Amino acid sequence: MANPLYDNLFGKHAGRDAPFLHLVDGTVISYRDFLAQTAQLAHVLTGLGLSPGERVAVQVHKSPQALALCAACAQAGLVFLPLNTAYTTDELTYFIENSGAALVVCDAGKTASLTPVAAGLGAKVETLNADGGGSLTDKAAAAPDSFDTVARNADDLAAFLYTSGTTGRSKGAMLTQSNLLSNAQTLAQEWQFSADDVLLHALPIFHTHGLFVATNVTLVAGGSMIFMPGFDLDEILAQMPRATSMMGVPTFYTRLLDDARFTKEAAAHMRLFISGSAPLLAETHVQFETRTGQRILERYGMTETNMNTSNPYAGERRAGTVGFPLPGVELKITNPETGETLPQGEVGVIEVRGPNVFKGYWQMPEKTADELRADGFFITGDLGVIDEAGYVSIVGRGKDLIISGGYNIYPKEVELVLDEQGGVLESAVIGVPHPDFGETVVGVLVAQPGQSPDTDAIMEAVKGPLARFKHPRRLVVVDSLPRNTMGKVQKNLLRDAYKDMFMLA
Ligand code: MCA
Ligand code: AMP
């Protein structure tokens, strides 16, 4: 009987009294205690009648119990489906329906809106609140603290993460046990994580970055994490002297640099700062080194692939690049029209292949075929170039995507909502530079003839269908959208017209 993911991340720590989680209130949770809670939760999940391979949709605040629920899904052979806490009921309804989740776990405050959705699908609902209380942990408290791990194969599904598309609805990226495990093992080695590492963990645990990269790398190495509910600058600065490493989106680093308390001394105990999920400006990299004497290590990944490239731990961490393909990952730059591999130095679409690449999109064979080639290469939609030394740089996006503070926003999804609003003939949603979030959302509206859209009412109306981070930060009304001869909206011209909107003091 074996379950590679559970055995190699969690099971191998059975009985260890070493710390796994340090909470900001001073509580320390050992591996032994964490695994006991995991086992109790696994009993609850199987007691609810869930069978291996079924999906568990989870929209809960970050807590040790939420992480134990993820581990319990691995131990019980279930597919973990984490969901952004900012998602609205409209958004959640789609994810629950599309995934065919057998269980929905949410905050008690969400049960009234989600119970009817779940009931319509025959799914059960349990609660898990920000403080770790709720029906799930109540039941777990009475369960045995050891559990016979359910056997799974390396190729079995371990997680579903929804990622939006340039057209239509979100797609459930199916990640296998071996996708997650192989990447975590590679990263732990590349970044030289050990049992002595104490990782400052301020990322959410509903995305690849905080869940699979930060947590799984720590588990592979047997280190510990300072597990913070979210990004709190004061708390990060207070905790840094006892941490060795941190992973963050670029906003973490620009916020640190904006604070005079962040000095070389404040960072002296840290051996590694890692950035990803969005482009780190070369300027931020340089400022960081000037301030701390340390170079941020930038890496590049995607929900569908986990991590693909990384700057070297020991060699030169080159600003503005995402480093080299990870061991086991093949990366090529191709012509977007023909799919032909381009010579070194030319800009094209980044394609990757390796044990990290997902199995496909849940019940979307056409979308899978569009992006995942039969030979195993995944077409990322990112535009890149490889320099003569082999460093990969991301120079743009072939896909229409905005990344705000590390969260992805697909303009199409916002445009569909804006187009429905009173007085709006059509809309174009663009990303423009933002000092804190890197990029932010601007909606450009064209009025119906003879009408003037009420932008305040529109900002109110988007709250139902769209999570807060997707809301336009500004709406502008124009006479018409610029189009090329094919009739396609020229978003580059709009981006250029509004590029200084948030940057000028
Ligand atoms: C919060 N808000 C945001 C964002 N975060 N709006 C746009 N973009 C955001 N990222 C909203 C809040 O709801 C609030 O709205 C207002 O903006 C100000 O929030 P603030 O307090 O400043 O934000 P915060 O709570 O401090 O959060 C900012 C953050 C957070 C720390 C940067 O967004 C974050 O943790 N981002 C990390 C995301 C991440 O993990 N990405 C990885 C996915 P109001 O004013 O109305 O209340 S990508 C991935 O996994 C791939 C594979 C990869 O490569 O890593
Ligand atoms: P997600 O869909 O959340 O997995 O986001 C993946 C996307 O984030 C990638 O396709 C890139 O566009 C972007 N991304 C991740 N890491 C980096 C990075 N270091 N530099 C630039 N873009 C990045």
Image: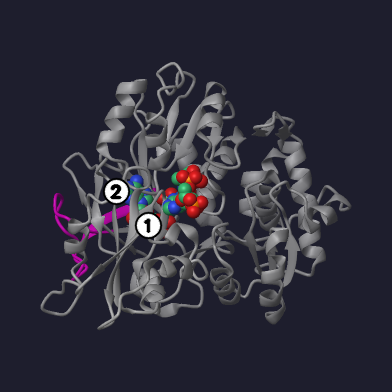
The structure residue drawn at horizontal position 71% and vertical position 66%, both measured from the top left corner, is 111
Mark nearer the N terminus (2 vs 1): 1
Q: Specify the quadrant that holds the C terminus.
A: top left
Residue to which mark 1 is pinned: 473
Mark 2 residue element: loop
Residue situated in front as seen by the camera: 148 or 216: 216
The structure residue drawn at horizontal position 61% and vertical position 61%, both measured from the top left corner, is 153
Q: Where is residue 289? Give x, y as percent.
A: 32, 25
Discs 2, 1 touching: Cβ within 8 Å: yes
Q: Where is residue 478? Give x, y as percent.
A: 22, 69
Which numbered disc covers residue 502?
2
Mark 1 residue element: loop
In this rendering, is residue 416 above or below 333? below
The answer to whether any part of residue 374 appears in the image is: no
Residue situated in front as seen by the camera: 191 or 468: 468
In this rendering, is residue 31 above or below 328? above
On whether residue 70 falls in the magenta region, the answer is no
